[in-house]
């Protein structure tokens, strides 16, 4: 098996801890540079800039003024989640990391599908 698909399979398996025993998954967690348990969040300024750029308005126009929480609830390899309010109701705002499309394109390019 080529090395790239094997590494990708091991890395992907490290995110599915519930599928395998700890004996199997513990070593796999170290194969992924972005293990879901160790991913740092990005800055609040970056998160706010991404939201404003994607939705075309300032944060305080998109959500109730002053309610977008700068501290993320959680961060993962694909993005992070922030709290805010809209119309007085609490909402969660999922902010996708920048540059993911290029990473996905590279991953898809490395996947080899056998021809029948």
Image: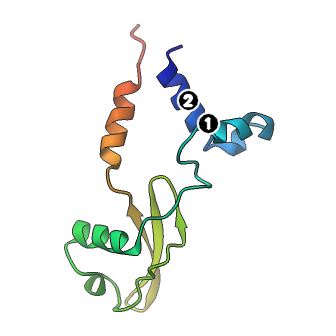
Circles 2 and 1 in contact, beta carbons < 8 Å: yes
69 vs 58, left or right, is right
Q: Residues within 10 Å of mark 1 (few under 14, many from 20)?
A: some
**Residue 50 sits above or below residue 8 on the image:** below
Q: Considering the image in quadrants, where does the N terminus appear?
A: top right
65 vs 7, left or right, is left
**Residue 79 sits above or below residue 11 on the image:** below
Give the residue drawn at x 43%, y 65%. Answer: 42
91 vs 21, left or right, is left
108 vs 36, left or right, is left
In this figure, which residue is indicated by the disc labeled 2? 9
**Inter-mark Cα distance, 2 to 1:** 6 Å
Q: Quadrant of residue 113?
A: top left
User: Residue pushed farthest left?
Assistant: 56
Q: Where is residue 12 in the image (x, y as percent from the top left)?
A: 56, 37
Q: In which quarter of the image is residue 7?
A: top right
In this figure, which residue is indicated by the disc labeled 1? 13
Q: Position of residue 56 (x, y in %)?
A: 19, 72
Q: What element carries label 1?
A: helix
Give the residue drawn at x 66%, y 36%. Answer: 28
Q: Which sits in the foreground, 62 or 78? A: 78
């Amino acid at each position: 098996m080529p090395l790239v698909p094997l590494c990708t399979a091991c890395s992907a398996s490290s995110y599915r801890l519930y599928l395998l025993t700890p004996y199997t998954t513990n070593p796999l967690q170290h194969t992924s540079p972005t293990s879901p348990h160790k991913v740092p969040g990005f800055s609040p300024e970056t998160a706010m800039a991404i939201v404003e750029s994607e939705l075309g308005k300032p944060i305080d126009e998109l959500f109730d003024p002053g309610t977008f929480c700068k501290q993320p609830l959680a961060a993962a390899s694909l993005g992070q989640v922030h709290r805010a309010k809209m119309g007085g109701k609490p909402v969660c705002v999922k902010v996708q990391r920048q540059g993911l499309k290029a990473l996905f394109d590279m991953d898809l390019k490395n996947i080899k599908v056998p021809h029948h």
